[in-house]
Amino acid sequence: PLAPISVAIPAIIFGVTAISLPLAASEAFGLSTAQTTAMIAALYGIPAVLSLVLTILYRQPLLIAWHTGGLIFVTSVARSYTYTDVL
């Protein structure tokens, strides 16, 4: 009976923290809602599509999903550079 709870709690924590990094970056750059939505879609959508293509091509799960380091770096330079400079 505790197994679903023990799986749900880390999943909820990961879900909340995974979305907090892009939101912090968009807030640091002062992005609009549309820009934030596009950034989040690109951060999670592009790796998902690439992972799907690689999985189908090689018939084994090959996942591409590491953007945390880049987000932390980009957020750290937000005070020195504008969003268009970083792009």
Image (cartoon, rainbow, N blue to C red):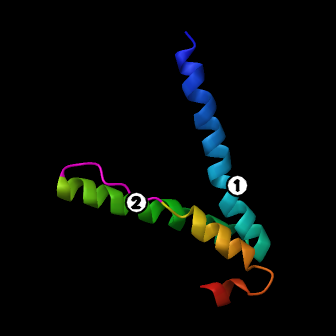
Place of residue 27 in the rendered image (x, y in percent of width and height, measured from the top left)? 78, 68
Left or right: residue 13 versus residue 57 is right
Place of residue 40 in the rendered image (x, y in percent of width and height, measured from the top left)? 59, 63
Amino acid, disc 2: Ile
Q: Which residue is drawn at 75% across and 79% down?
A: 78
Residue of label 2: 64
Stretch of the chain drawn in magenta: 59-65
Q: Residues within 10 Å of mark 2 (few under 14, many from 20)?
A: some
Left or right: residue 20 versus residue 30 is left
Amino acid, disc 1: Ser
Place of residue 28 in the rendered image (x, y in percent of width and height, measured from the top left)? 78, 72
Tell me the quarter of the picture where residue 51 sits. Answer: bottom left
Tell me the quarter of the picture where residue 22 sits. Answer: bottom right
Q: Residue at x 58, y 28 (%)?
A: 8
Residue 86 vertical placement versus 37 (above, below): below
Q: Residue at x 58, y 62 (%)?
A: 68
Q: Residue furthest bottom?
A: 85
Give the quadrant of the N terminus: top right
Q: Can residue 31 be seen in this view?
A: no
Q: Residue furthest top?
A: 1
Left or right: residue 65 versus residue 77 is left
Disc marking residue 63: none
SS under mark 1: helix
> Quick check: is 2 in the magenta stretch?
no
Give the quadrant of the C terminus: bottom right
The span from disc 2 to disc 1 (Cα, nearest Å) is 20 Å
> Quick check: is 62 in the magenta stretch?
yes
SS under mark 2: loop
